[in-house]
Amino acid sequence: MLVFPFFDYDYARRIMAMQHDRYWNLVGFLAMEGVSFGLNAERLLGLEESEVGSFCIGFTGCDHRVLQDMHDCIAGYFRFLEYRWPLLADLDEPADVIPVWEEFAMKEFRELMMETAFARGFFNALRFSNTKTGYAGEAAMRIVQRQRYRCMFAHPPLSALARDNQVAFG
């Protein structure tokens, strides 16, 4: 996980640190959840040995970088919602925040997987990681997330605005 602000006033360092510490476990869970999604879709559709199903059955792991941007966007959105509508005010200990964060991330991922473009991108990114097809899959996931989280991306961090203005006018 890259730790940086996604939106103006995204300075929840305690939450960022907790998300960073849980990155490896959560990315693995998200990958396996996506693989389960693919197998369930194949079963529900009555497909026998589709490309996605064959890939899912043989799935043993992936390059974490394929899912890093997806994870980081979900993490930023969690902090955005927390900033706008404080949900964690009564939780003082990081150990209390971890289950709330992980439950949110899993729920958000499941909702993203309901978007055809995202799911197709997810499987292409995993199956063809570090190739043109895989990069296109990552881009497809990114487009869906940028649209879904447009309220967050409409408020870029002040440091990014300053940097952009410096480049444009400097």
Image (cartoon, grey):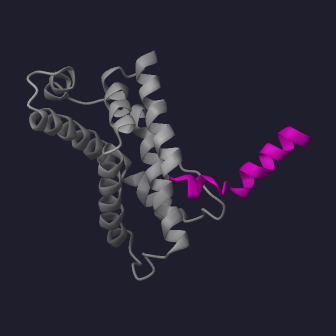
Q: Would you identify the image quadrant in which residue 120 lies?
A: top left
Q: Nearer the viewer, residue 13 or 169?
A: 169
Q: Would you identify the image quadrant in which residue 87 lies?
A: bottom left
Is residue 164 left or right of 17 when viewed as pictured?
A: right
Q: Residue at x 11, y 38 (%)?
A: 44
- In the rendered image, the residue lying farthest to the bottom is 90
Q: Is residue 170 visible?
A: no
Q: Is residue 167 magenta?
A: yes
Residue 94 at what x, y percent from top left? 39, 69
Give the main secondary structure, helix, strand or loop, of the magenta stretch.
Answer: helix
Q: Is residue 3 visible?
A: yes
Q: Nearer the viewer, residue 81 or 98?
A: 81
Magenta region: 149-169
Q: Residue at x 46, y 42 (%)?
A: 144
Is residue 18 left or right of 48 when viewed as pictured?
A: right
Q: Is residue 96 magenta?
A: no
Residue 31 at what x, y percent from top left? 28, 39
Q: Would you identify the image quadrant in which residue 61 lies?
A: top left
Q: Residue at x 35, y 25 (%)?
A: 124
Residue 139 at what x, y percent from top left? 49, 31
